[in-house]
Amino acid sequence: MALHPVKPTTLRTRESERSLPEVRAVSTAVALRDLRREHDGREVVRGVSFEIREREIFGLLGPNGAGKTTTLSMISTRIRPTSGDVWVYGKHVVHDVTAVRRMLNVAPQEEALYPSLTAAENLAFFAELYGVPRRDRPGRVAEALEGVGLAARSDDRVGTFSGGMRRRLNLGCALVSKPRLVLLDEPTVGVDPQSRAHIFDAVRTLRAQGMTIL
């Protein structure tokens, strides 16, 4: 099964021939070179190569089992590649793990929310977890709520939210640290049309703010 890197409207199949110094240029946000991952003797990701430019919205398309989540996990340093290389803003995901983690954040497919807390409390918790200075947290929480269209529900417990609203808040939790790179794993799966529109609007806003989105 194939894993296809794409822009919003353009299929990208070209493998770059850039040298390592060029790959590490500031204008390249993410670069993959012949990335492979094996699990239990099976090749899950097979020789994936692509580049993402700064402030680009970039998508990976493929059927279930094609290796999309595994690829994101390698970019985020959650798992190590079997072979190949990944650079995030010039930092290698194996050799510069701490530096890479400081530059990105992930909105996972599985919701990482606390239903007994309010939307604002969830965001404040993650802001603290990500090391956002205390004085900056209220502003970051307010920005994230506004960005995902949940400002009016900031004091409501997450346990009362619809599935689409929880997905939007899940995205908001990835934004409070203001990362340079945001990784979204199936961000619109199972959401209603209104929530999908809010998520797409949020992604466009992130790009306008200088972030790169995969």
Image: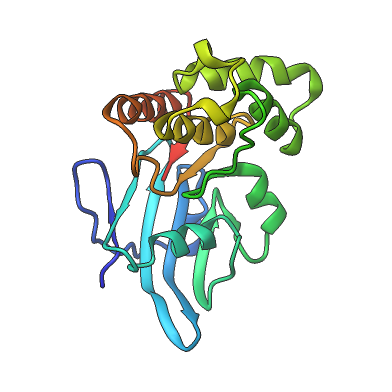
Q: Residue at x 58, y 33 (%)?
A: 173
Q: Residue at x 63, y 66 (%)?
A: 94
User: Which residue extends farthest front?
Assistant: 160
Image quarter of residue 7: top left
* In front of the other: 106 or 10: 106
Residue 6 higher or lower than 166, as above or below: below
Q: Position of residue 213 (x, y in %)?
A: 43, 40
Q: Position of residue 28 (x, y in %)?
A: 45, 47
Left or right of 122 on screen, residue 167: left
Residue 193 higher or lower than 40, as above or below: above
Residue 122 higher or lower than 52, as above or below: above
Q: How many marks?
A: 0
User: Which residue extends farthest right?
Assistant: 134
Left or right of 2 on screen, residue 128: right
> What colour scheme does the image use?
rainbow
Q: Residue at x 44, y 59 (%)?
A: 69
* In front of the other: 112 or 7: 112
* In front of the other: 197 or 131: 197
Residue 77 higher or lower than 162, as above or below: below
Image quarter of residue 156: top right
Image quarter of residue 112: top right
Q: Residue at x 56, y 55 (%)?
A: 76
Left or right of 105 on screen, residue 166: left
The quarter of the image holding the N terminus is bottom left
The quarter of the image holding the C terminus is top left
User: Which residue extends farthest bottom?
Assistant: 41
Q: Position of residue 22 (x, y in %)?
A: 46, 55
Q: Position of residue 147 (x, y in %)?
A: 48, 20
Left or right of 186 on screen, residue 141: right
